[in-house]
Image (spheres, helix red, strand yellow):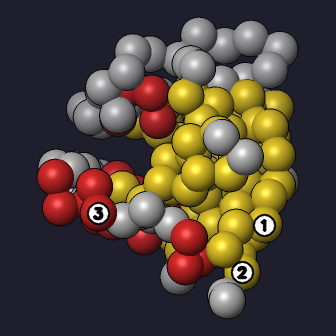
Amino acid sequence: MEMGKIIVFKLGEEEYALDINFVQSIERIQPITRVPNAPSYVKGLINLRGNIIPIIDLRKKLNIGESVFTDHTRIIITHYEDIELGIIVDQTSDVMDVSLDKLEMELSGRMEFDAFGGIANISGRLIILLKIEELVKTEVHSSRFNF
């Protein structure tokens, strides 16, 4: 039984997760510099300890509204290959162990969203797993500007 660690976060009332191997840090919200002609879900760029990182509003990307910044709002700094990407979430909640063979994947054939990685049912909590490689690919590589 292969185990993995995930970082769980909230968008509204729903819980989502990313593989912790792709998470660099979790940051408080900070000033974001807008980029002209960017897709609406691209909030802009931040300078994080000397690194310029593109930031996306995951709520907007998933078509579940737009983030309203509160004291709980966080930016999850992710990395995949040589790309760093910041993802705005409503709040982070847990780091959990998940048995990779327990993931429910049968929905993925019916989902139009490439970044859907399955659903973990952990103690009655349904947690939607997202694939960072798909988020990075769609956000950074297909945008009109290169980071």
Q: Residue at the spot x=66%, y=74% of the render?
A: 99
User: Going by the image, does 82 lie left or right of 146?
Assistant: right
Can residue 84 be seen in this snapshot?
yes
Q: Which residue is mark 3?
A: 106
Amino acid bearing label 3? Glu
Where in the figure is residue 105, as x and y percent of width and height? Answer: 36, 65
Amino acid bearing label 1? Asp
Can residue 115 be seen in this snapshot?
no
Q: Earlier in the sequence, mark 2 or mark 3?
A: 2
Q: Which residue is mark 1?
A: 97
Q: Residue at the spot x=51%, y=66% of the render?
A: 103
Q: Earlier in the sequence, mark 1 or mark 2?
A: 2
Where in the figure is residue 16, as x and y percent of width and height? Answer: 57, 43
Q: Earlier in the sequence, mark 3 or mark 1?
A: 1
Q: Which residue is mark 2?
A: 3
Where in the figure is residue 34, as x and y percent of width and height? Answer: 47, 28
Which mark's residue is nearer the viewer, 3 or 1? 3
Q: Residue at the spot x=65%, y=40% of the render?
A: 124
Crowd class of label 1 (few under 14; some 14 to 19; many from 20; radius 10 Å): few
Q: Nearer the viewer, residue 85 or 110?
A: 110
Q: Tag 3, which secondary structure? A: helix
User: Going by the image, does 146 lie left or right of 50?
Assistant: left
Q: Residue at the spot x=63%, y=67% of the render?
A: 19
Distance from the alpha carbon under mark 2 to that under mark 3: 20 Å
In this rendering, the answer to whether 43 lies above or below 3 is: above
Where in the figure is residue 33, as x and y percent of width and height? Answer: 56, 30
Q: Are marks 1 and 2 in contact (CB under 8 Å)?
A: yes
Image quadrant occupied by the C terminus: bottom left
Q: Nearer the viewer, residue 42 or 16?
A: 16
